[in-house]
Amino acid sequence: MPPSPPHRSRNLALAALLGLLATFLLHASPAGASAALRVHAAARAKFIGAALATGPLANESAYRGLAAAEFNQVTAENAMKWDATEPSQGQFTFGGADAVVSFATQNNQQVHGHTLVWHNQTPGWVQGLGASAMRAALQNHISQVVGRYAANPAVVSWDVVNEVFDDNGTLRTSFWYNTLGQSYIADAFRAARAADPDARLCINDYNTEGINAKSTALYNLVRSLRQDGVPVDCVGFQSHLAIQYGFPSQLQQNLQRFADLGVQVRITELDVRMVMPRDAGKDATQAAYYRDVVNACLAVTACAGITIWGFTDKYSWVPDTFSGQGAALIYNDSYQAKPAYTAVHDALAGGTGGTDTTPPTTPGTPAVSGVTAGSATLTWAASTDSGGSGLAGYTVYREQGATDPELGRSTGPTITLSGLSAATQYQVYVRARDGAGNLSAASPTAMFTTSTGGGDTGGCSATGTVQNQWDGGYVVQPVTVTNTGTATISGWSVTFTLPAGHAVTGSWNAALTVNGQTVTARSLPYNGTLAPGASATFGFQASRPPGDTSTPSRYTCAS
Ligand code: 9MR
């Protein structure tokens, strides 16, 4: 049986009540339309938090003011990491960490400790240790860092291990894994529980927001750790999103499947970046992403809350990491609230009375035009919204059974879908959305089939689906090869072009040869023979430059 979830004493409930009261007094307004985010979040029994950077926390009153007024939870963006807290062995430095904890205490905010065991921001002296010394260092570090705040009621939870998976769902071959094997994960949780029996202990990762190979590997790990009695209480979903990659439409469903394991879930590092420069359309899409993350958390009882990774674009990790991208947070560089702030505010305020609970009217049947191998245009009769929050836009879904993936979003009643698979039948429908996040009923569906993409010869076609992607790479799985002729084929080859700067890093179920940017994938002895109508599949993984969102656009089959 998994250990029972920890809980803080009644002191915390009292502190929370006092905090709420203080916030009410501070803002001299009840949870009305213009109240701070934290007032609305507390009314929904959730936290709304921000990662704090110690520099501006010490030096900028505008930063401190907003951090205190708007949030009831904080995470140290860097100050509790290993390089900050134990830069050399046994020498602990808590200046930054203490500053964050004392700010939180003054402002009735709960603190999430981030992070105890990670492959980044860990000093070289740790990485060079042998197995038994490394295990001892891990246990001592956790015992000292968690132990320092164990009696502090503000510090309620920890990211015990961070980013232990690679994107394909295998355990990351970090120095931790390479030296200690998988056991370092259970050891870390047990050490944290020993250091603070009441703290909530989390495992945290990115690209796990949707249902994919990585999130399923995380799910299986959490289940098996808990079956073994390892004290994993909580799972953090970082949620570093980008408007150019699409919204993880299975977020709520994914949070719920983890919640059903008996763990708390939380959004730990939310930001939504865009390719610069900002414009009103990108801001609106970003705002919709923020709103939908908040709504997903609100819809899952076990979701404790949402931490935004910073709050002002003035201090964000994004521009330093993804060149040409930025503006990922809810305030701009000069602390002005952006549409994303309003979206978070209104989503948290929704349901507290007097707000819009009336969905927009149902959109008309989409009319399809301009179908190509990879794109199609849909146009429909517009919806109207009478609930007060106004029509915010439309989302187009593909009808696929249990879960219908999102194909795109628009603000007006038309959209050109791109990135579609060639020679594929699509059944699609549209739902309208208002400013409070209410969704209309689904429109009637429309059907179309994309063209083959041209170039196919010898009675076969090939289509590729991007299964998973991240900044720096992607997985195309499956590439489906179909015999479209009337005779059996005894071997096939599929050719595609890699965009500049991309490189194949792995493949399966086909033999790949690369010539410049042209890749040829040939059938293997066991999957080359295809009767008329039959299909075979293969897949590959590729790397691409930071900030590049492209993938191969066309797969050409020959037999
Ligand atoms: O935001 C953090 C940035 O200031 C640091 O330079 C960076 C170094 O690794 O870490 C950033 O925070 C990361 C977090 O700790 C774990 N998840 C991903 C975050 C963004 O990289």
Image (spheres, helix red, strand yellow):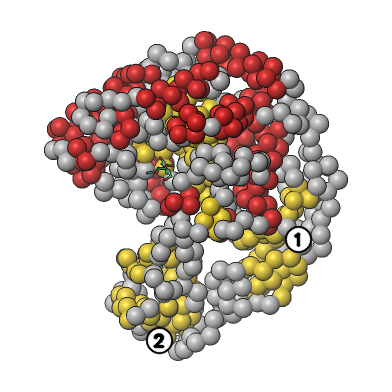
Q: Which mark is residue 120?
A: none
| Residue 481 can be seen in this image | no
Instruction: Kindly identify the residue that appears in the image at 30 percent across and 78 percent down.
Output: 513
Packing grade of label 2 (10 A; few <14, some 14-19, many >=20) is: some
Q: Is residue 290 above or below residue 28?
A: below
The answer to whether mark 1 and mark 2 are in CB contact below 8 A is no
Q: CA distance from mark 1 to mark 2?
A: 44 Å
Whether residue 401 is situated above or below residue 124 in the rendered picture: below
Which residue: 61% across, 61% down? 407
**81 left or right of 377?**
left
Which badge, 1 or 2, comes first in the chain's sequence?
1
- Name which quarter of the figure residue 447 lies in: bottom right
Image position, residue 31 (x, y; %): 73, 25
Residue that protrudes farthest toward the right in the picture: 386
Q: Residue at x 26, y 48 (%)?
A: 173
Q: Is residue 16 visible?
A: yes
Report the number of discs: 2
Residue 521 picture location, percent across and down? 35, 77
| Of the two numbered discs 1 and 2 in the rendering, the one whose residue sits closer to the viewer | 1
Mark 1: secondary structure: loop
Please, what is the three-letter code of the amino acid marked with disc 2?
Answer: Ser
Q: Pick out the residue farthest to the front.
A: 59
| Quadrant for the N terminus in the image | top left
Going by the numbered disc 1, the residue's amino acid type is Gly
Q: Quadrant of the C terminus?
A: bottom left
Q: Which residue is mark 1?
A: 412
The picture quadrant for ligand 1 comes to: top left
Spot occupied by residue 360 in the image (x, y as percentages of width and height): 80, 49
Q: Position of residue 68 (x, y in %)?
A: 58, 26
Please name whichever residue, 226 or 485, is drawn nearer the observer in this view of the structure: 226
Q: Residues within 10 Å of mark 1 (few under 14, many from 20)?
A: some
* Residue where numbered disc 2 is placed: 559
